[in-house]
Image (tube, helix red, strand yellow):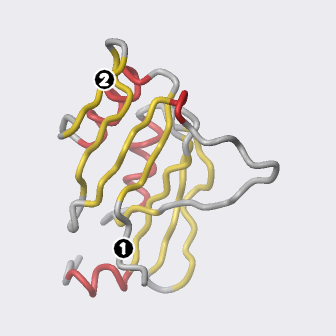
Amino acid sequence: MFRGIATLNFYAVDMVAAENWYSELFQTAPYFRRDLEGSPAYLEWRLGDKETEFGLIDARFAPSTPDAAGGAIAHWAVDDVEAAYAELLGRGATSYQSPIERGPGFITASVVDPFGNVLGVMKNEHYEEMFDVAD
């Protein structure tokens, strides 16, 4: 039934600042843009080995907040978790969870971006085997 992430959506109140922050982080501008009232309402990038879609949505369109925390974190595969974590912190993100080895071949870390979204990074040996991405 599940075939992969189709689109990962994050929300931001200041879409212009978020567009700039993520464009610098991803080193590319969004490939898709939908404006509303003269400012971005939805932006989308394609990233990584499978060109996963990353959508940035104006917070006005966010679903209501549940009464209890959900706890989901999407972890992006990276070659070096410590370096990715340090870069994210250097770009103004704050630590959510510093790098932790979860077992041989598995390291995770996560940050909160300047717009309140949790962004995870991960070294995952299964991902690397699947895409034959050797160190």
Rendered view: 68 above or below 77: above
Q: Residue furthest right?
A: 67
Q: Residue at x 56, y 38 (%)?
A: 62
Tell me which residue sits at (33%, 29%) in the image: 19
Residue under numbered circle 2: 35
Query: Marks 1 and 2: CB-CB under 8 Å?
Result: no
Q: CA distance from mark 1 to mark 2?
A: 28 Å
Instruction: Locate the N terminus and report the quarter of the image it occupies.
Output: bottom left
Q: Is residue 125 left or right of residue 85?
A: left
- Of badges 1 and 2, the one in the foreground is 2
Q: Which mark is residue 4?
A: 1
Taking 81 as reference, is 92 above or below it? Answer: above
In primary-sequence order, the first of circles 1 and 2 is: 1
Q: Quadrant of residue 44?
A: top left
**x%, y% of residue 40?**
34, 24
Q: Residue 126 shows which numbered tag?
A: none
Query: Is the residue 131 above or below the residue 54 in the image?
Result: below
- Mark 2 residue type: Asp
Residue in view at x 30 percent, y 66 percent: 79
Q: Could you tell me which quadrant the C terminus lies in?
A: bottom left
Q: Amino acid at mark 1?
A: Gly
Along the line of sight, the residue nearer the viewer: 62 or 84: 62
Disc 1, SS: loop
Q: Is residue 135 left or right of residue 69?
A: left
Foreground of the two, 103 or 44: 44
